[in-house]
Image (spheres, grey):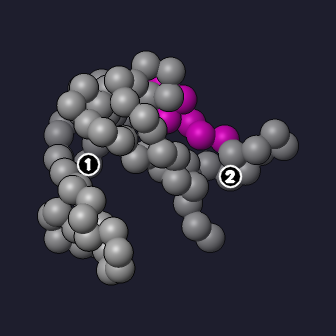
Amino acid sequence: MGALRAGRLPHGPGTVGAGAHRSVEVRRRIVEGPARAALLDASADAALLVVGARRPRGPFGPDIGRVTHAVLHHVACPVAVVPEQG
């Protein structure tokens, strides 16, 4: 399994972006270890977990990948899957 890596955060902590969604609390954590385990642990006290789908669209719809698939089946909170734009 892959590890979560530090990345560039497009917005400061506690914000979602411009507009009406500033009332949404966002918690970002950088952790090391298997991505599946880290996301499942994070879901224990989350109201919503947002994950991405970066693989190309398959013949039956988006191909979400192993980590997102595992999260959808074992998570402790609602999940939003956001496809990569492009």
Which residue occupies 26% across, 70% down? 22
Which quadrant is the C terminus positioned in?
Answer: bottom right
The residue at the point 37 percent across, 30 percent down is 77
Disc 1 marks a residue whose amino acid type is Arg
Q: Give coordinates of residue 1: x percent, y percent.
A: 39, 28
Mark 2 to mark 1: distance in Å?
22 Å
Magenta segment, which residues? 63-70
Residue pointed to by mark 2? 56
State the SS at label 1: loop
Q: In front: 42, or 66?
A: 42
Q: CB atoms at circles 2 and 1 under 8 Å apart?
A: no
Q: Say the numbered circle drawn on residue 5.
A: 1
Horizontally, residue 42 falls left or right of residue 71, namely left
Which secondary structure dominates the residues rendered in magenta?
A: helix
Is residue 75 rendered to the left or right of residue 64? left
Q: In the figure, 17 relative to 51: above or below?
A: below
Name the residue: 20% across, 52% down.
Answer: 28
Instruction: State the image coordinates of residue 38 (x, y, percent, origin top left).
Output: 26, 31
- Residue at 69% across, 45% down: 62
- The quadrant holding residue 9 is bottom left
Q: Element type at marker 2?
A: loop
Residue 69 spot, x, y in % from top left: 54, 29
Residue 45 picture quarter? top left
